[in-house]
Amino acid sequence: MRKTLLLTALLSTPLAAQPAAWPLSQTEQASPAVPSVLRLRERATIEDKWLAERLDTLALPLMREAGVDMWVLVAREYVDDPVLKTMLDGENFTARRRTILVLTDRGEGQPLERLTVSRYGLGGLFDPSWKPEEQPDQWARLAEIIAERNPKRIAINISPETAFADGLTAGQFQELRAALPPAQAAKLTQAGDLAVNWLATRTPSEMALYPMIVRTAHAIMAEGLSNKAITPGKTSVADLEWWLRERIAELKLETWFHPGVAIFRQGEAKELTGDSIFQPGDLVWLDFGISYLGLNTDTQHLAYILKPGETDAPAGLKAGLAAANKVQDAVTSSFRTGLSGNEILLQARRKALAQGLEPTIYSHPIGTHGHGAGAAIGFWDDQAPSPRGNHKLRPNTAWSIELSNLHAVPEWNGQKVRFQTEEDAFFDGQTVRYMDGRQTELKLIRPK
């Protein structure tokens, strides 16, 4: 019933007027039910409405911010540009032969012109602009379109700094440049931040359902970190990983990475993986993500397998999770519009270290890609400022608050355990809010 009402509201309400259909929550449910998963046709309808909104409201302001009045995107079949792929509708979701999109700023008071250099349009979002019977050469037709509009600066997706703005292959770039007269070729410029900001920015309509997508991932994780999927003394780490993969497929969802599972065990210096069998007294770590409605999740949760007679996890393990929560607070309280990822990293580390914590911070953007476009906030193997952290923080962006904290567990003879956590959140320009809460209590798995 909730699925039907939600879908009806989303499809009947103008996008600009839609309230948050699935509100952000700071408190995570311990064992949530998996929300009803939309059918493929329903998903495509929603994604196409989102794309129309993005093209109508987001593309032109970002182009003007970047100082370009034309954006040319080119991709060949099987070699998709990461930006172009996000501009294709639910029935034309990948490049065919050669797909060329041309977005042109026609001046104040004029809507963005959106063309595809093909004989057919694309989902009513890009108008056709090529008749091969009149001009057999697709590149020549593109050159004509550019000459007719005579833009000042033409953005293309070439970048030595980020894959998100580097989707134009070397061969296609050579052909594009060869097709243009020198005066027009001189106008070509790297899209850079234009491509990154297009991918990174979330719209109100996307955020109306993103928390539901995260709830879906949390619910699957709760199933995996329970006796439904784990029988202590029998189930292995690899068994759980593949159980999760099967569960994703059963729901007709996808994942952008193989689930990560490990055991932290008293007396073991390293985490246990692969064929290791879960046993009572183990701390279980899960790194999990799904892809749904064109958006991704990336979350990490912890569970404890009770020993016979236990009703709760040892106090030292619970304190370890609480310490990791404090590192999360240090990160999210450091978000400020205009700061670089490197600046946020340094501020967050100072706050955490001042509390006697031992943090490693490696948070990242998330959205149309799991490790999304935008600034990196540290790396698990490098806590120093990096060129990949130079991008500035912008409003209306989604983040995976990913980190770990090393904590000594008294019940394990002072053994230091790395408590790894990750939760998906939204930054509105002022505050960071978790989309579906964050884990503050260890999940509990009963012994056999």
Image (cartoon, rainbow, N blue to C red):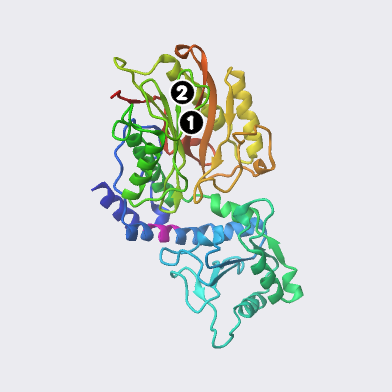
Does 368 sit left or right of 310 as displayed?
right
Q: Say what amino acid the circle numbered 2 marks.
A: Leu
Q: Is residue 128 magenta?
A: no
State the SS at label 2: helix
In the rendered image, which residue does mark 2 sit on?
321
In the rendered image, which residue does mark 1 sit on?
421
Residue 297 locus on image (x, y percent):
45, 43
Residue 213 locus on image (x, y percent):
39, 45
Q: How packed is label 2: few (under 14 Cα within 10 Å), some, or many (20 or more)?
A: many
Q: Which residues are magenta?
A: 46-50
Task: Name the residue nearer the viewer: 310 or 157.
Answer: 310
Residue at 52 percent of width and 76 percent of height: 118
Residue 381 locus on image (x, y percent):
62, 34
Q: Say what amino acid the circle numbered 1 marks.
A: Thr
Task: Name the residue nearer the viewer: 106 or 147.
Answer: 147
State the SS at label 1: strand
Does 67 sit left or right of 91 as displayed?
right
Q: Quadrant of residue 147?
A: bottom right
Q: Which part of the image, by quadrant, shows the C terminus?
A: top left
Q: Is residue 10 above or below residue 387?
A: below
Task: Name the residue nearer the viewer: 57 or 407.
Answer: 407
Residue 65 got which mark?
A: none
Residue at 30 percent of width and 24 percent of height: 446
Q: Is residue 422 above or below residue 52?
A: above
Q: Can the viewer see residue 339 in this picture?
A: no
**CA–CA distance between discs 1 and 2?**
8 Å
